[in-house]
Amino acid sequence: MLCCGGSPRASSPATGLVQRQIDYQQVVYSFEVFLPSSYNGTHQLPATLLIHGGGGKGQDMIAAWQNFAEQTAIILVAPTVPLG
């Protein structure tokens, strides 16, 4: 994923919580990405994919891990997958 530091960028990327969407088989899925404040786009950081249980939301998973991610400089990615 480019947002995980795939290549250096000329300008600093936005940090914090960002909502994204992906279209897969004509269904739009939302996911949240948290970039720690130490991320500047010039080096790679590890990323962790957070998966919730049925009826959960990606944003809730980010909230549970955000402080840890900020302290340890990791990127969080958390999809919201609808029930069914």
Image: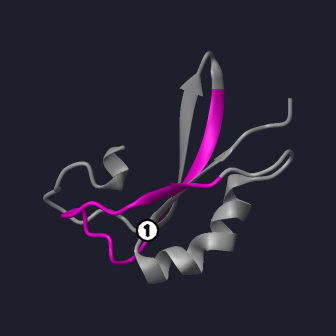
Residue 70, position in %: x, y? 47, 78
Q: From the viewer's perspective, is residue 60 above or below residue 66? A: above
The span shown in magenta is: 28-50
Quarter of the image that includes the C terminus: top right
Q: Secondary structure at mark 1?
A: loop
Looking at this view, name the residue that lies furthest to the left.
10
Looking at this view, name the residue that lies furthest to the top.
25
Colour convention of the picture: one colour
Q: Quadrant of residue 66?
A: bottom right
Q: From the viewer's perspective, is residue 67 above or below residue 81? A: below
**Is residue 50 rendered to the left or right of residue 55?**
left
Residue type, mark 1 in image? Ile
Q: From the viewer's perspective, is residue 84 above or below residue 73? A: above
Viewer-closest of 32 and 69: 69
Q: Quadrant of residue 40?
A: bottom left
The structure residue drawn at horizontal position 31% and vertical position 46%, both measured from the top left corner, is 2
Viewer-closest of 75 and 20: 75
The structure residue drawn at horizontal position 24% and vertical position 66%, both measured from the top left corner, is 12
Q: From the viewer's perspective, is residue 64 above or below residue 30? A: below
Q: How many marks?
A: 1
**Is residue 16 rendered to the left or right of residue 3?**
right
Which residue in the protein does label 1 denote?
74
Quarter of the image that includes the N terminus: top left
**Mark 1 neighbour class, 10 Å CA radius: few under 14, some 14 to 19, many 20 or more:** many
**Is residue 40 rendered to the left or right of residue 33?**
left
The structure residue drawn at horizontal position 73% and vertical position 39%, both measured from the top left corner, is 81
Residue 65, position in %: x, y? 62, 71
Residue 28, position in %: x, y? 64, 29
Residue 61 part of the magenta-drawn span: no
Viewer-closest of 81 and 68: 68
